[in-house]
Image (tube, grey):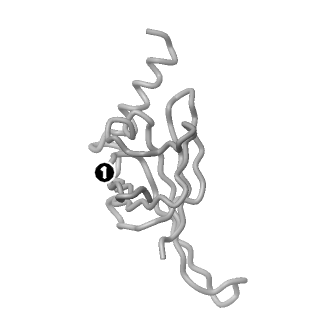
Amino acid sequence: MGIIAQARLDINDIVTNANDFGVTLVFEAPTSPVTIKTIIGTGKHISLKFDELGMVQGRGSNATCTVTEAALIAASYPYKDGNGNITFERHKVTMTDATATGVYMVDTWTPDKTLGLIVLEMGDFT
């Protein structure tokens, strides 16, 4: 086994380990019928609060998570379009960790095809 293949296996073991780094991510694809799958990945909630002196007042939250392509494939989650391109357009993610549960809409996704990782940046689902 080559070094890249071993790295892919190692990173998958780390990211999908629910006992150490992993958090529960419930993915909802905008397919017909809707596809819902639970996948273990890494993630963090980012809460924003603007005070009276800020440019914007209000509350908002964002999140980021990382999943492996191997975990998506194992769950049979539809993350590629008809042309085989990775897409998370209009996908919803519910993320639960030790601090909170949040429901988010995927804004951007950045795949790393070498390691098989996909980083998702998400905003509040309203």
Depth check: give the residue in front, 94 or 35.
Answer: 35
Depth check: give the residue in front, 106 or 43.
Answer: 106
Q: Residue furthest top?
A: 1
Tell me the kind of residue under disc 1: Thr
Q: At 39% across and 58% down in the image, what residue appears?
A: 32
Q: Quadrant of the N terminus?
A: top left
Q: At 35% across and 65% down in the image, what residue appears?
A: 99
Using the image, determine if residue 48 lies above or below residue 119. Answer: below
- The residue carrying pointer 1 sits among few (fewer than 14), some (14 to 19) or many (20 or more) residues within 10 Å by Cα, namely some
- Whether residue 24 sits left or right of residue 2 in the image: it is left
Q: At 32% across and 42% down in the image, what residue appears?
A: 20
Residue 31 in the image, given as x and y percentages of width and height: 42, 56
Residue 40 in the image, given as x and y percentages of width and height: 34, 46
Residue 53 in the image, given as x and y percentages of width and height: 70, 88
Rendered image quadrant of residue 108:
bottom right
Residue 121 in the image, given as x and y percentages of width and height: 56, 56
- Whether residue 110 sits left or right of residue 74 in the image: it is right
Figure disc tally: 1
Element at badge 1?
Answer: strand
Q: At 35% across and 54% down in the image, what residue appears?
A: 35
Quickly name the residue at label 1: 38
Q: Residue furthest bottom?
A: 52
Using the image, determine if residue 20 lies above or below residue 49. Answer: above
Q: Residue furthest left?
A: 19
